[in-house]
């Protein structure tokens, strides 16, 4: 089966490569010629575990190729996936659909037989209908359908999430489209993966509802963690205690410095905007957006507490700059707010991230930040050590060595990696989230 994917960003590249791995003939299309050249040479523009080898394997087995010309790229394709970016519009938080509509216009000019056009990009409810109308207006003769097939990929585990998803959601308007998309996902069907066929608008809303619910769950446990600080409870045990309830589930109940990434912040905002547009209440998600933004602004308070309110002139080591481990992605990372605030307080920063250094250097241009390429050298002579992203490299630190390197044995652990009692026993001033010190006296 011939498949085309427009957009070779995070979603398009992973989806195209995995569909090729399923045995499809995949053509990935992007107007960035340098990116396309690199991809054909097996050079991958993003860090995603396992992606490079999978791309190279499918290039060698001639199931995937990368082109810039859309007309050639979609020729003879039975399904064309639109996987272009839909960033938040700065002025109003709506999803910017200009790249989606541009792709639709270009597709309209090149269609030459029945094709299913599939929105894989995260798009507001009703976008599929708009894409249909754009194409129909430009190309009245050809038969086609527009479907919605949102992705649920997590950065850092995207290949596994595509190859072994909890479910596939497909919104389509005809049996003909359903038949083609059933064929595309047949390998997963054979794995008994639940495939939900529904209306296009329903599939579009499922994506936003899923991400907004996950963001809500994280915000809930973050606010419970703050309450734990006040009432002397242990948020880790609260997470376990509620997560054992099958109706709640234990995942996404880890308190932290606030969620980041290219999806939760963007999708929660876009869903709130959609609700406003349709004059429908979504106060819960509105609160989640505000609460998470506020949390990122207040993270500095825990470091202030650790410095006994004397931040000026202090040297702070930050381990972890990306929004989560196993990615080089800095988008909406808590570090983007915390580091400038620390600099404003007169701190100097030593920073290390296993994969995000290059991305971070592009964002921060401040000579008060020193960049390091390994964990311990970033700690030398620092007053406070901060763990912001829970990379595996930070989960078993040699604290004897850490103590020697730091000016004072002070650790602020935004991911609750370590045990407060054990840290106290080895002489650290240890600060974490939702696990007040008196619990471990
Ligand atoms: C998310 C959704 O999980 C995925 O289904 C969707 O397709 C894209 O958006 P992603 O943003 O890559 O994936 O990462 P995810 O693992 O969901 O984490 C998002 C943010 O939430 C990160 O900043 C992470 O640190 C934070 N998080 C996650 C928590 O703070 N606590 C948790 O328990 C889980």
Image: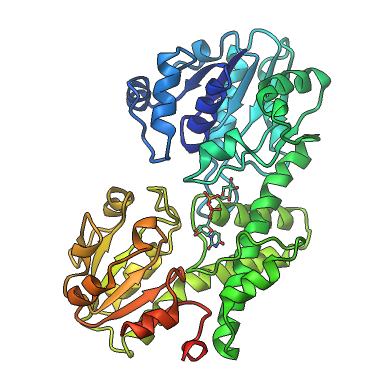
Percent across and percent down for residue 159 are 52, 36
Please name the residue shown 37% across and 85% down the image.
Answer: 424
- Decide: is 62 above or below 385: above
Q: Quadrant of ligand 1?
A: bottom right
Whether residue 266 is visible: yes
- The colour scheme used to paint the residues is rainbow
Comparing 393 with 168, the one in front is: 393
On the picture, is 108 further left or further right than 62? right
268 or 213, which lies in front? 213
Q: Position of residue 232 (x, y in %)?
A: 57, 89
Which residue is rendered at x = 79% and y = 17% of the image?
A: 176
- How many marks do you count on the picture? 0
Q: Is residue 337 above or below residue 149?
A: below
Q: Quadrant of residue 97?
A: top right
Q: Is residue 333 above or below residue 33?
A: below
Residue 242 drawn at (x, y percent): 70, 70
Residue 29's x, y, as percent? 48, 22
Q: Is residue 39 left or right of residue 220?
A: left
């Amino acid at each position: 089966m011939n498949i085309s994917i427009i957009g070779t960003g995070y979603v398009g590249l992973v989806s195209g490569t995995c569909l090729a791995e399923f045995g499809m003939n995949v053509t990935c299309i992007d107007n960035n010629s340098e990116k396309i050249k690199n991809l054909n040479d097996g050079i991958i523009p993003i860090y995603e575990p396992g992606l490079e080898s999978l791309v190279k394997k499918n290039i060698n087995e001639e199931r995937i190729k990368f082109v810039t010309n859309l007309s050639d790229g979609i020729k003879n394709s039975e399904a064309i996936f639109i996987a272009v970016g839909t960033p938040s519009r700065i002025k109003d938080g709506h999803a910017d659909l200009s790249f989606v509509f541009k792709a639709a216009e270009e597709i309209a000019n090149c269609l030459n037989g029945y094709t299913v056009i599939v929105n894989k990009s995260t798009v507001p409810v009703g976008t599929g209908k708009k894409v249909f109308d754009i194409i129909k207006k430009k190309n009245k003769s050809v038969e086609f359908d527009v479907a919605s097939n949102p992705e649920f990929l997590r950065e850092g585990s995207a290949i596994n999430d595509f190859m072994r998803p909890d479910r596939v959601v497909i919104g389509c308007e005809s049996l003909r489209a359903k038949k083609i998309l059933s064929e595309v996902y047949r390998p997963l069907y054979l794995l008994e993966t639940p495939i939900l066929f529904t209306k296009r608008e329903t599939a579009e809303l499922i994506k936003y509802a899923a991400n907004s619910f996950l963001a809500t769950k994280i915000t809930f446990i973050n606010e419970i963690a703050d309450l734990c600080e006040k009432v002397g409870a242990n948020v880790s045990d609260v997470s376990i205690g509620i997560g054992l309830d099958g109706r709640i589930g234990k995942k996404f109940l880890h308190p932290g410095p606030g969620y980041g990434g290219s999806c939760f912040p963007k999708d929660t905002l876009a869903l709130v905007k959609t609700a406003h547009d349709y004059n429908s209440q979504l106060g819960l998600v509105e609160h989640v957006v505000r609460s998470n933004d506020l949390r990122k602004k207040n993270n500095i308070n825990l470091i202030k507490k650790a410095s006994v309110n004397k931040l000026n002139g202090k040297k702070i080591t930050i381990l972890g700059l990306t929004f989560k481990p196993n990615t080089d992605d800095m988008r909406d990372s808590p570090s983007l707010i915390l580091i400038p605030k620390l600099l404003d307080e007169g701190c100097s920063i030593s920073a290390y991230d296993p994969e995000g250094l290059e991305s971070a250097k592009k964002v921060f241009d401040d000579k008060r930040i020193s960049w390091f390429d390994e964990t311990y050298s970033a700690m030398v002579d620092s007053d406070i050590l901060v763990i912001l992203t829970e990379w595996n490299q930070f989960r078993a630190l040699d604290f004897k060595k850490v103590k020697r390197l730091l000016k004072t044995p002070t650790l602020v652990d935004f991911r609750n990696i370590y045990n407060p009692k054990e840290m106290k026993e080895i002489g650290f001033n240890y600060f974490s989230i939702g696990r007040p010190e008196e619990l471990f006296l």
